[in-house]
Image: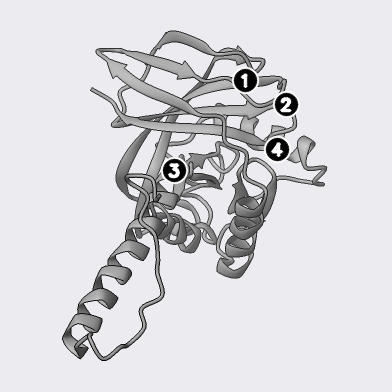
Amino acid sequence: MPRSGNPRCHLIRASPGRSPAMIKSCALVLSFCLVVCIARARADERPTVVELFTSEGCSSCPPADALLAELATRPDVLALSFHVDYWDGLGWKDPFSGRQATQRQERYRALLDLTTIYTPQIIVDGRWQAVGSDRAEVEHALDLARRDRRDIPMTLAVNGSNALFKLRAASEAVSASVLLVGFDRRHSSAVKGGENSGRTLAHADVVRGVDEVGQFSGNPSEFAAPIRWHCERVAAIIQAGDGRILGVAVSDAE
């Protein structure tokens, strides 16, 4: 017998005892079941992490910022905008820039065996890189990430100024860091110098800080960590030593 809660799909055949209206009604029910099944599958999947390394001082970056803002609306993507600091001495200091963003990009350069760092650059799930404004490259990287997704179940909750983590057991032994990322959903800035002088730039999911708050070897774990930034949202990310993203959870910050 069918298990409760699992919609089954059956072939509907016309017969003398079934009216066209009945067949149409059954078809509508079938369509609804398919939608429910697809929605349930997507809800069970963790989002793919898309990290954009950008700067308000870079004239090539606004198209990448716009693409990231578009990706940020998708439920299957966790978009994060890291503003690097190596453009800050070239006519405009990005108000959202920080050394930590540059250091994270440098780490990806080493992990992915790249010759240099640049803006705008997108890193997908810690494994695939693309020019941040190249939609085709980014979509290709997203497709590769979906085909090779790892997902260690985890939850993230916020209690005051603390983030509460709960990690389930992994299917195999791993060696990974647990990161806490604070970010704001929207920012804009009137640029008064550098390559984008005179423009008002909009940014999505701007990272305010990243802390490594724990290590994960594959065993179940629960712990808390302070949220050290004023931010609108927080994300927990399990990241292996080779850069691969293994788990993701997101919560609003109180």
Residue placed furthest toward the front: 17
| Mark nearer the N terminus (2 vs 1) | 1
Q: Residue at 55%, 61% (x, y): give it.
A: 60
Quadrant in which the C terminus appears: top left
Could you tell me how far apart the alpha carbons at marks 2 and 1 are, in whole angstroms? Answer: 7 Å
What amino acid type is highlighted by mark number 2?
A: Gly
| Secondary structure of residue under mark 3 | helix
| Mark nearer the N terminus (3 vs 4) | 3
Dot in front, 3 or 4: 3
| Mark nearer the N terminus (3 vs 1) | 3
Label 2 crowd (10 A; few <14 / some 14-19 / many >=20): few
| Mark nearer the N terminus (4 vs 2) | 4
Q: On the image, numbered disc 4 is attached to which residue? A: 108
Whether tag 2 and tag 1 are in contact, CB under 8 A, the answer is yes
What amino acid type is highlighted by mark number 4?
A: Tyr
Q: On the image, numbered disc 1 is attached to which residue? A: 177
Instruction: Indicate which disc residue 241 carries.
Output: 2
Could you tell me how far apart the alpha carbons at marks 4 and 2 are, in whole angstroms? Answer: 11 Å
